[in-house]
Every structure is written in C-alpha cells, then in structure tokens.
Image (spheres, grey):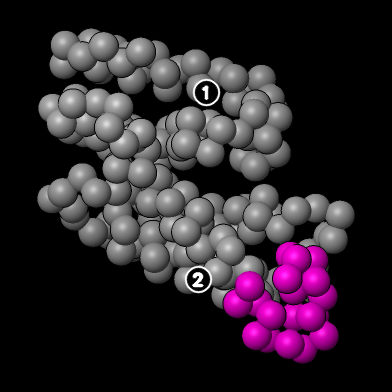
Amino acid sequence: MEDLAAIRKCREGDTDAFHHLVRRYQGQAIAHAISILGNREDALDAVQEAFLNAFQALKRFDGSRRFYPWFYVILRNCCYKYAAGRKRRETDDLESAEILLQPGSLSPEESISLERTLMELSSEERELITLRHLDGLSYEELAERLEVPRGTVMSRLYNVRNKLRKRMAQLNFNAD
C-alpha cells in the first residue's frame, strides 16, 4: 500500500490503514528520536506519542507532500516536549550513539571515543549530524525538515563538525 492510499483510507475511517505508515517509518523514527533524546526508552515513548498525534492530525495532511517529512516535524516536537517535561533517563551504556556509526569502520576504542563525543553534543547538534550523515539529507532537505533557512543549516553543520573535530583531536583521534 502506498502512503497516500493509507492516509486516504484513514481519513475514510479505516484505522488499520495507519499500521502501514507505522510499520514503514517506525525504525527511522526511533533512530531519529534516539539521536535527539539520547536514549532508547525515551525515544520509544516519544515515537509512540508522535504516531498518535500524527494519526489525529491526518485530516490536516497536505497530500502534495511526502508523509515522513511531515511526520518528522511532529516527532521532533514530541521529542523536545518530552525532553523538557521529563527528567531524562540516565544511560550507562552508549547504545543510543551506535546508530550514528558505520559498522566496522572504526576500531572499538575509536568507536567508544566517537560515541562519547557524540553524546556530549546537544540534542539539536546530534539531530543535525544524524540527519546529514546517517540519513544523507541535502542542505535543502535539512532546511525543510528543521524549518530553518539553508544558510542556517550550513552554518550549524560547520560549527558542529568543528566542535567534533576539536573534541576528537583532544582524544588523539583522527575524525576525518
């Protein structure tokens, strides 16, 4: 089933059609929520809330847009609301940063250093790095998804990359 067909069926009262959208985008949504919130438990809660909010807002969905960028705005807002309203759960492990790494591209020591460095970033910085380097979004796509001008995206990426390079250099690690 295509996204627009599922949305049309949902609008006609077929609530089961929404399961298509959940199954299709749940993994991506969880990864994005983890990059914002910093741990899996909070991310799962935020994703669940975002899908519920999206379902309730489907009547306002503009069919000329793709579903996930529209849904991402809802997810992002849920994540920030969740982070502001609840105390974040503490994580002793670094599982949440694993999604940001290419498997096998780094030694275990380098992976741990990079994961720790990524977790030192603000949630907005981690989100930006994740969307650009994990999802491969262009500057234009980032600007649309984050609802900021393209120049702002470029500036923020430049700054966060420099921050990562400096921190990794302090750890004697080649981040390029």
Q: Main secondary structure of the magenta part?
A: helix
Give yes or no for residue 130 being in the magenta stretch. Answer: no
SS under mark 2: helix
Taking the image as drawn, is residue 5 in sight?
A: yes
Instruction: Identify which amino acid the numbered label 1 is placed on.
Output: Arg
Tell me how far mark 1 sits from mark 2, CA to CA.
Answer: 28 Å
Q: Which residue is mark 1?
A: 156
> Going by the picture, which residue comes out furthest to the bottom?
13
Label 1–label 2 contact, CB within 8 A: no
Instruction: Report x, y in % for residue 91.
Output: 18, 53
Q: Which residue is mark 2?
A: 49
SS under mark 1: helix
Q: Residue at coordinates 34% horizontally, 62% vertically from top-left?
A: 42
Give yes or no for residue 3 being in the magenta stretch. Answer: yes
Q: Is residue 112 left or right of residue 6?
A: left
Instruction: Report x, y in % for residue 99.
Output: 36, 44
Q: Residue at coordinates 85% horizontally, 61% vertically from top-left?
A: 63
Q: Earlier in the sequence, mark 1 or mark 2?
A: 2
Residue 21 drawn above or below residue 146: below
Instruction: Identify which amino acid the numbered label 2 is placed on.
Output: Glu
On residue 34, which mark appears? none
Instruction: Report x, y in % for residue 49.
Output: 50, 71
Where is the C terminus found, in terms of image quarters? Answer: top left
Query: Which region shows up in magenta?
Result: 1-20
Q: Residue at coordinates 80% horizontally, 66% vertically from top-left?
A: 4
Where is the N terminus found, in terms of image quarters? Answer: bottom right
Residue 117 drawn above or below residue 24: above
Instruction: Report x, y in % for residue 18.
Output: 65, 77
How dense is the environment of label 1, judged by Cα within 10 Å: few (below 14), some, or many (20 and up)? Answer: some
User: Quadrant location of residue 8?
Assistant: bottom right
